[in-house]
């Protein structure tokens, strides 16, 4: 059978008859054709150039046809609306394409000009750096410099009393006046006077309430007699 492998003795006999170091036969890999994918990769530049030239020729043909052909804005007899729209679009396509290309070119030029102006302005600013802004209150003294409590103290100094602020700083102007440690503290005589005044106010209030109650009762009695 042809698909069966020959015996080893037969194969060795055939090998000895053929010999060694023979030239490659026609069935070797060097004589085989390259695959299409490999050929496409190797000839990529040539294929790209051919496609570009073909595309240019097609565009030139379309432009020449559009120039030769007159655009008719009116519908032809026995022409449907769908065919009319398609015909007008085909006629106007090269004009629209040229308009888009020209507008894109104008936009690119404007952007380049803007970038160039920005670059020149940035270089000018870098060459001439701006002067630093003036410092506010440069000649004025800082807060708490004129206050005695801000003076430096030694480590073992003894404080006889808490500090008293006789003048407010600049940022606290318009607020409540400074208070000392003795504000809000009353003596015994003052507390006694306040207690007496409180008792007098309570007595007056009770007298006022009693007089009003008596007047109301009298009015009610007179009304009952009249009825």
Image (cartoon, rainbow, N blue to C red):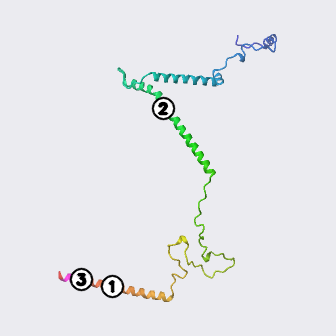
Magenta region, residue range: 217-225
Residue 41 pos. (x, y %): 64, 25
Q: Secondary structure at mark 1?
A: helix
Q: How many marks?
A: 3
Residue 219 disc label? 3
Confirm or deny contact between disc 1 and disc 2 (CB under 8 A): no
Residue on which the image places disc 1: 208
Quarter of the image with the C terminus in it: bottom left
Does the magenta stretch mainly form a helix, a strand or a loop?
helix
Marked residue nearer the N-terminal end (1 or 3): 1
Structural distance between the alpha carbons of marks 1 and 3: 17 Å
Disc 1 crowd, CA 10 A, few/some/many (<14, 14-19, 20+): few
Tell whether 170 sits left or right of 81: right
Disc 2 crowd, CA 10 A, few/some/many (<14, 14-19, 20+): few
Quarter of image, res 21:
top right
Residue beneath the point at 63% across and 21% down = 36
Residue on which the image places disc 2: 99
Residue 206 pos. (x, y %): 35, 85
Residue 82 pos. (x, y %): 39, 25
Q: Is residue 47 above or below residue 122?
A: above
Quarter of the image with the N terminus in it: top right
Confirm or deny contact between disc 1 and disc 3 (CB under 8 A): no
Residue beneath the point at 71% across and 15% down = 31
Marked residue nearer the N-terminal end (1 or 2): 2
Structural distance between the alpha carbons of marks 1 and 2: 100 Å
Q: Secondary structure at mark 3?
A: helix
Q: Nearer the viewer, mark 1 or mark 2?
A: 2
- The reply to whether the magenta stretch includes residue 219 is yes
Marked residue nearer the N-terminal end (2 or 3): 2
Between residues 184 and 175, which one lies in front from this camera angle? 175
Between residues 52 and 221, which one lies in front from this camera angle? 52
């Amino acid at each position: 059978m042809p698909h069966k492998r020959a015996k080893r003795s037969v194969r060795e006999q055939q090998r000895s008859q053929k010999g060694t170091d023979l030239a490659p036969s026609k069935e070797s890999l060097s004589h085989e054709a390259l695959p299409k994918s490999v050929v496409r990769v190797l000839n990529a530049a040539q294929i790209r150039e051919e496609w570009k030239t073909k595309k240019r020729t097609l565009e030139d043909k379309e432009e020449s046809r559009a120039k030769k052909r007159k655009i008719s804005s009116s519908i032809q007899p026995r022409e449907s609306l769908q065919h009319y729209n398609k015909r007008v679009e085909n006629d106007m396509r090269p004009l629209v394409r040229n308009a888009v290309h020209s507008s894109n070119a104008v936009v690119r030029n404007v952007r380049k000009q803007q970038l160039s102006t920005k670059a020149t302005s940035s270089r000018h600013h870098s060459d001439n750096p701006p002067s630093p802004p003036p410092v506010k209150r440069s000649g004025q003294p800082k807060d708490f410099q004129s206050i005695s409590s801000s003076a430096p103290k030694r480590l073992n100094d003894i404080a006889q009393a808490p500090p008293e602020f006789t003048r407010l700083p600049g940022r606290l102007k318009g607020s409540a006046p400074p208070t000392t440690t003795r504000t809000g503290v009353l003596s015994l005589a003052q507390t006694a006077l306040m207690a007496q005044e409180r008792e007098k106010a309570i007595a007056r209030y009770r007298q006022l309430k009693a007089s009003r109650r008596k007047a109301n009762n009298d009015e009610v009695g007179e009304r009952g007699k009249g009825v």
